[in-house]
Amino acid sequence: MKKVVDPASLSYISWSHLESDECGALNEFLGVAPKAEPVHGQIGVMLSVGDFFDRAVRGLGDNEVLDLGQKKLRFLITPHVPHAWDAILVFEETTGTLFCSDLFTVFGKPQPVTESDIIEQSMSALKDLPGYLPVGPHTGAVFDRLVALEPKVLAGHHSSAYNGNAVQALQDLRGELFRFAGLAVEEVVQGSDEEPSKAEPYG
Ligand SMILES: [Fe+2]
Ligand SMILES: [Fe+2]
């Protein structure tokens, strides 16, 4: 981390959801980042983070923008996407970078940045991780929001930063997730009141 930026210079630190690989070392990190204010969504603050961390956490509302000066972080409160009730995603508006946490997870050590297809590898990993990304009507609504932002880069937590057609990749991942879950994509995404019909199981 110090090779990239001096932690002591940080003003803020944030993460998607309460999980070891997201924020498990936050207290140690705060020890070397004395000026950093932890920032999370209001749900996360209400639920638990105050009990876990040594420094007060600021809770931002849905769509609230944290102005960093040159960069602007829009906080999206996205319960259960990628997973966990407290989940948030963050969109950096000046570069169009969507910090998408566990979406597009792959195994191994992917390249830092890629334009190559990321869906096939992601779905291959997901088939080995049952229940990793819960899928339901809430999922479609969040993906609609993400697509509407028209991101240019998808910066995942366990994947390459994808700078190909990010909107198409989001649409493709949504479709694959619904197929994998055995749900009809169109009915759920469009918010139909009817019971979703079963599709053929993925693969
Ligand atoms: Fe996670
Ligand atoms: Fe993760």
Image (cartoon, rainbow, N blue to C red):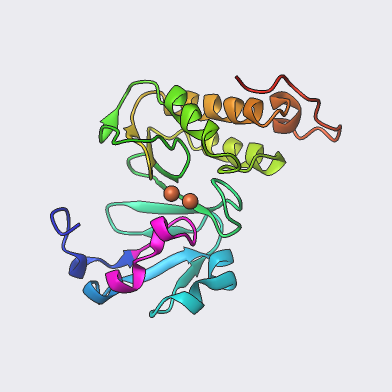
Above or below — where is 13 with respect to 166? below
- The residue lying at 53 percent from left, 24 percent from top is 172
Going by the image, does 77 lie left or right of 160?
right
- The residue lying at 80 percent from left, 30 percent from top is 196
Q: x, y percentage for residue 136? A: 70, 40
Going by the image, does 24 lie left or right of 48?
left
- The residue lying at 26 percent from left, 75 percent from top is 35
Above or below — where is 80 with respect to 61? above
Quarter of the figure that contains the C terminus = top right
- The residue lying at 34 percent from left, 21 percent from top is 116
Quarter of the figure that contains the N terminus = bottom left
| Span colored in magenta | 13-29
Is-magenta flag for residue 178? no
**Going by the picture, which residue comes out furthest to the left?**
3
**Going by the picture, which residue comes out furthest to the right?**
194
Q: Nearer the viewer, residue 59 or 27?
A: 27
Above or below — where is 113 with respect to 91? above
Q: x, y percentage for residue 14? A: 39, 61
Q: x, y percentage for residue 61? A: 55, 62
